[in-house]
Image (cartoon, grey):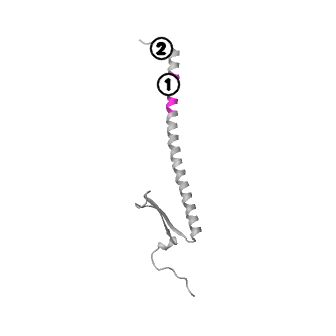
Amino acid sequence: MFRFTIRDVLWLTVVVALACTLLLSFRERRRMASRLRELERAADVTEHVRTERALIDELQRVTGRPMRTMRYRNDPSKPTGYKWHFEYGDPDSTKSGPPSTPNSD
């Protein structure tokens, strides 16, 4: 039969505690790395939106026309396969029906 001393039980407790701490630390590190990747993706999207908004504002300023949409479309004739497509005009001009006329009362 095995005989254990108090010293053996204390060493076992220390080893188990260290193993649990290490396991929890790795799990937390993995969770934090995942969250960091999510935040970096969100920051990239936010930066892209800011850049796109600045581009739209600059194009509207230079052309003097309001821009309705700006899209990055597939274009097989280009080596990159994509090109920017801009639509100018009042964003509300897509509404159906006759244009509104002011009352001449």
x then y, percent, for residue 32: 52, 40
Q: Alpha carbon of mark 1 to alpha carbon of mark 2: how far?
A: 16 Å
Q: Return the mark for residue 66.
A: none
For the record, the magenta segment spans 13-24
x then y, percent, for residue 88: 51, 70
- In this rendering, the count of numbered labels is 2
Q: Callout 1, which amino acid?
A: Val
Q: Is residue 2 magenta?
A: no
Q: Between 81 and 29, which is closer to the camera in this rendering? A: 81
Q: Which element is circle 2 on? A: loop
Q: Are marks 1 and 2 in contact (CB under 8 Å)?
A: no
x then y, percent, for residue 1: 41, 11
Residue at mark 1: 16
x then y, percent, for residue 76: 40, 60
Q: Return the mark for residue 4.
A: 2
In the rendered image of this protein, does residue 13 appear above or below residue 45?
above
Q: Callout 2, which amino acid?
A: Phe
Question: Quick one: which residue is furthest to the left in this view?
Answer: 76
Q: Which element is circle 1 on? A: helix
What is the crowding at mark 1: few (fewer than 14 residues within 10 Å), some, or many (at least 20)? Answer: few
**Residue drawn 51% across the image and 41% down it:** 33
Q: Nearer the viewer, mark 1 or mark 2?
A: 1
Q: Between 32 and 87, which is closer to the camera in this rendering? A: 87
Of marks 1 and 2, which one's residue comes earlier in the chain? 2
What is the crowding at mark 2: few (fewer than 14 residues within 10 Å), some, or many (at least 20)? Answer: few
**Residue drawn 49% across the image and 79% down it:** 99
